[in-house]
Amino acid sequence: MIHSPLPARVFAVASAAEIRAVLAALAAHGAADRPACALLSPAGAGCLMGPAWWRAVLAETGAILPAYLDCGAAAGRAAEALGLGLRHIVLHGDGPQAATIHLLARTLGATCLAAPPPHCVVGPVPVPARLRAYLSGTDTPPTAP
């Protein structure tokens, strides 16, 4: 299976409120010139919170963007995520277990990255201007009026 390239804009989010802030920024940006976007869990969240937590947060917000769960180096948690139906994971490391998970992901038509992609950390207090600036192609938010 050929996977689409990684989205141009990836937002690291840790809560439903942060996901909602990203969705609001996307809605305000308009669909015509919006770059492809994805969500990313915090580093190692698959180990700490678990794949069921990520799936529940995504379901609560209704987010339909590609959403990557960072499983750290925990191959077992990555396998669990794939078993729960998550189709985008990050698994650090390159040993035999990681190779098996990458093969399993390909077999399921899922995406397994070896490292998190470049991303914008939304943060616990999302700043809409910063999110809009990132969507527009700059990592620096506009200066306040």
Image (cartoon, grey):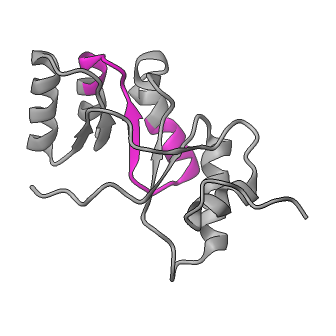
Q: Is residue 67 left or right of residue 12?
A: left
- Is residue 80 located in the magenta-colored stretch of the structure? no
Residue at horizontal 52 percent and vertical 78 percent from the top: 31
Depth check: 34 or 87 in front? 34
Q: Which portion, as a residue range, is magenta?
A: 55-78
Depth check: 17 or 102 in front? 102
Looking at the image, the residue that sits furthest to the right is 145
Q: How many marks?
A: 0
Residue 37 position within the rendered picture, expressed as x and y whole percent measured from the top left: 45, 59
Residue at horizontal 39 percent and vertical 52 percent from the top: 66
Q: Is residue 45 above or below residue 120?
A: above
- Residue 145 is drawn in which quadrant? bottom right
Residue 134 position within the rendered picture, expressed as x and y whole percent measured from the top left: 60, 58
Residue at horizontal 14 percent and vertical 16 percent from the top: 95
- Residue 25 is drawn in which quadrant? bottom right
Residue at horizontal 66 percent and vertical 63 percent from the top: 132
Q: Is residue 94 visible?
A: yes
Q: Is residue 57 left or right of residue 113?
A: right
Residue 107 position within the rendered picture, expressed as x and y whole percent measured from the top left: 8, 42
Q: Is residue 24 visible?
A: no
Looking at the image, the residue that sits furthest to the bottom is 32
Specify the quadrant that holds the N terminus: bottom left
- Is residue 60 located in the magenta-colored stretch of the structure? yes
Depth check: 74 or 117 in front? 117
